[in-house]
Image (cartoon, rainbow, N blue to C red):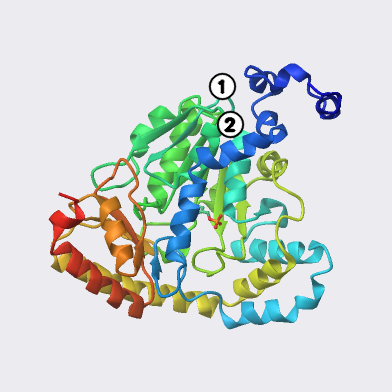
Amino acid sequence: MSVSRRRFIETLGVGGAALGATGAATAGIFSAPIISARGRESLYAFQGVADRRADRKLAAAPGIVRIDSNENPVGPGKRALDAIRGHLDECNRYPVLGEDDVIDTIARLQGVKPENVILGCGSGELLRAADQAFTSKQAAYIGAGPTFEAPGDFAKFLGVEVKLVPVDAKLGLDLGAMGAAARGAGLVFLCNPNNPTATVHSKADVTSFIESLNRVSPETTILVDEAYFEYVEHADYGTMIPMAIANPRVVVLRTFSKVYGMAGLRLGYAVGRPETLARMKQWVMGSNVTQLTLVAATAALEDSSHITEEVKRNHEVKAFTRKFFADAGFAMSTGDANFMMVDLKQPAAAFKKLALGKGIAIGRAFPPLTNHARITFGTMKEMKKAVGVFKELLAEPTRAAGQ
Ligand SMILES: Cc1ncc(COP(=O)(O)O)c(C=O)c1O
């Protein structure tokens, strides 16, 4: 080893042996990926990020109907966009005041205190922070199969045991089986509505799931991801925010990437007790959200009529799209979100390729549900076009199945 390389390693405070094969364990599961440049590559490869990015790039090509990533096709409202324009000349400053404004506004609207809220560069950053805070080699990660994959993939990368409990026949979370699997675990990822299945569980069911788990496994934290909260139509659905304020083992996550139409601006937040959030905050980067995003979010939060309109728009498009599949004889999940899952009765991956060839980018298959495709609700105009393509392709199932 060259002298300069050894010096570099010493500067990091990790012995040379820590870079060897056994070194990852010696250095601890969190420090190993950080000190290794190749670790970063393997992190991306491990999570399939390269593939998903390539997929998104295809969907982003001009003229393609993008109904693959559960984005809001309309985008932020005028007030949010005006806020961005009005603060362009503040880009030279670090975003200190903007953070306080957003946190105060969220706290006021959610009926909590500012100390109950932390921000993330997208809720994705907070999901990683939760993995780092609550899981370890001794404390497993529990999720559903399938669910939003990023936190489970990251937990695996950290060397944590990941248990994914299959969804039930109606594509809902199997809360009983998840509870049983979660005894002694570090973190349960409870996505409600669940991405990709767009199924929901009532407030009463989630409450009793948490209470039972607290009794048998008091060390386990439950993260309830409510990314699609505003879109839910199910009458018995409700937020777990009050529980997160009362219970140190519960955290609720929200994002501005969905109903607020700000996926490209990157902002999410976690609500919980200060001592719980403090464990996550150690893993969150300082100044992690841009000033323009912060001012846009504050304006968006105050613009409730834009959210009401977006929810109404989504419900109308959902009804139109569901009618097409119902009339054509295809089973769907309840679609309590801005997307749903459809059983195409043929491999979804092959169907996705054919649809893309005709200008429609739909979501991928989520194993173990290989015949189900996740379809986001775009604008009405986009869905009319998409439905035309689906109709054509579904009339030739053997071609899509590649037989
Ligand atoms: C359930 C769920 N949680 C979190 C995220 C991440 O969202 P973001 O990082 O954009 O806030 C997504 C994105 O699709 C999601 O579906």
Residue 361 against residue 213 in the figure, above or below: below
Q: Say which amino acid is labelled 2.
A: Leu
Which is more toward the observer, 390 or 379? 390
Task: Name the spot of residue 115 as percent of width and height, x first.
Answer: 72, 52
Which is more toward the observer, 305 or 235? 305
Residue 272 against residue 91 in the figure, above or below: above
On-image quarter of the N terminus? top right
Q: How many labels does the image show?
A: 2
Q: Which residue lies furthest to the front in this view?
A: 2
Q: In which quarter of the image is residue 362?
A: bottom left
Q: Say which amino acid is labelled 1.
A: Gln
Q: Which residue is drawn at 81% across and 73% down?
A: 90
Q: Report if residue 86 is visible in the image.
A: yes
Within-10-Å neighbours for mark 1: few <14, some 14–19, many 20+: few
Task: Name the spot of residue 266 as percent of width and height, x first.
Answer: 61, 61
Q: Quadrant of residue 91?
A: bottom right
Contact (CB < 8 A) between labels 1 and 2?
A: no
Left or right, 174 with respect to 119, comes to left
Give me the disc on residue 77: none
Q: Which residue is drawn at 56% across and 75% down?
A: 76
Q: Mark 1 points at which residue?
A: 138
Between marks 1 and 2, how big is the CA–CA gap? 12 Å
Residue 249 against residue 5 in the figure, above or below: below
For numbered disc 1, what is the local secondary structure?
loop
Left or right, 261 with respect to 357, comes to right
Left or right, 64 with respect to 22, comes to left
Left or right, 219 with respect to 333, comes to right
Q: Report if residue 222 is visible in the image.
A: no
Q: Name the residue under label 2.
A: 158
Q: Residue at x 76, y 62 (%)?
A: 100
Residue 196 against residue 14 in the figure, above or below: below
Task: Name the spot of residue 219 as percent of width and height, x first.
Answer: 56, 28
